[in-house]
Structures are given as structure tokens and as C-alpha cells.
Amino acid sequence: AFGLFEKSGERILLCWLLISLVNELFLGLKPLRFLFLTEYSGFFAAGILIYRLRARKSGLAALPLLALSFAVSMHTSLTGVRIIAEKYNAEYSGLATASIVAAAFALFIAATSSAPTRLPLRLMSALGALTYPLYLVHQHVGYIAITRLKGLVSDPALLILVALGLILVASVIWVGVDRPISRMLRTRLTGWARAIAGNDYLVARMLARRHV
């Protein structure tokens, strides 16, 4: 706000990550967790830092902060998986969780590197658009599906089937809900903007005539 983040982005992110660490390691306060998203701040901060590094808004001094965001993400992910496993009486692998987090960071850094991507722009746009509906449906729907279907097939097959099912549901939401509403909003907002701009032009002309 007011250019503060552009000037002091790294300091703000450092404060955010430190608040997250203190809350997740010692306090466990739900208000802080909801207000500062302390469970996921490491991932958000990493995304912001990678963007700033790519856009040359941050220098190499931001790399230790990126490492801190990775550490926060790793801690909160391992803790979250353990809590979920205890809640649903399920087995979990800390090594698998850590590997997934590390792979996610590596994939994101590679995807945003300076090397040009060979993927078509439309495909990249579609993959990006799928992330939000997938974010909305993956957690609780995934838990319910895994709990209800567990035992019917092997665990690896169950994981693949649930993942594919969630991607399919997210695709339906994107095609059937997100895209039509986006087009409608874009059309209406563009019309309103043009109407406002036209009214401003008429008012300006009327005021100019009065001063003649």
C-alpha cells in the first residue's frame, strides 16, 4: 500500500515469516493463524520473492529470505500432515511430505526461470486458471473421498484416482462457472468504465463551455 511494499518488501516478508514461525512453534493462536495465514505464509512469501527476483525488484540478498520461506513451508507442511494423519487415523511419511515440498519449490523456480518455456501460452493460461478451483475443492473433498474409498483399491491407485477426479471437478468448475462469469463481469465492467469515461468527458465539455 502507498508504495510501502515496493520499498520495504523484504522487511515486510521477514516480519510475516517470523510471526508465522513464532505462532506455529510456540503460540498456536488461531486469530494469528487466520489473520496472517501462518500455516501457508512460507509458500506465499516464496512466490512473492521468486517474482521479485525474476522482476529484478529484489537482489541476491533476498535469497536467505527465500531459504527461510522454504524452511517455514517445510515445518508447517510436516506439522499439518501429522495433525491430519492423527485426526483420520492414517499413516503418513514425513520423507514423502518433505520431498513433495522440495519438488514443488524446485518446479516453481524452474518454471519461472529465465529460460523461455516451450509450452503453448493457452495451455499455460489454462493450467493457471485451474489452480483456483482446484484449491477450492481439493482439501475437504479429497479427505472425504480418500476416507470413503480407502480399502477398495491400493493406496497409490487411490491417490491417483482422487487426484484425477479433483482435477476433473476443477476443470468442470472452470469451464462451466468461472469462464462464463468472468466473461460476463468483463463485459459489464468494461461497459460501466466506458459509460463513466463518457460521462466524465461530457461533464468536462460542459465545464469548459461555462468558462468560455
Image (spheres, helix red, strand yellow):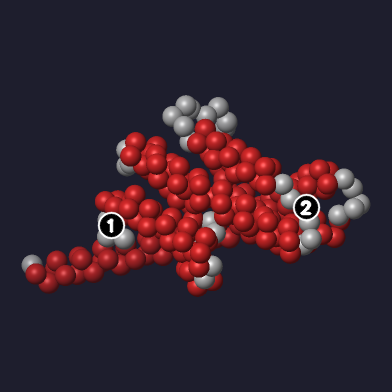
Residue carrying label 1: 4
Residue carrying label 2: 91
Q: Is residue 85 visible?
A: yes
Q: Nearer the viewer, residue 23 or 144?
A: 23
Tell me where residue 40 appears, x and y as whole percent. 53, 56
Question: Left or right: where does residue 14 sit relative to residue 187?
Answer: left
The amino acid marked with disc number 2 is Glu
Camera-side mark, 1 or 2: 2
Q: Is residue 152 above or below residue 207?
A: above
Tell me where residue 56 appears, x and y as whole percent. 33, 38
The amino acid marked with disc number 1 is Leu
Label annotation for residue 211 = none
Residue 193 quadrant? bottom left
Q: Nearer the viewer, residue 69 or 196?
A: 69
Residue at 52 percent of width and 71 percent of height: 29
Q: Residues within 10 Å of mark 2 (few under 14, many from 20)?
A: few
Tell me where residue 146 appears, x and y as whole percent. 80, 56
Question: Left or right: where does residue 113 sit relative to residue 144?
Answer: left
Pointer 1 or 2: first along the chain: 1
Tell me where residue 92 appears, x and y as whole percent. 74, 50
CA gap, disc 1 and disc 2: 45 Å
Look at the numbered discs 1 and 2 and tell me whether their residues touch, using CB distance below 8 Å.
no
Considering the image in quadrants, where does the N terminus appear?
Answer: bottom left
Residue at 77 percent of width and 62 percent of height: 88
Q: Secondary structure at mark 2?
A: loop
Marker count (numbered): 2
Residue at 62 percent of width and 49 percent of height: 130
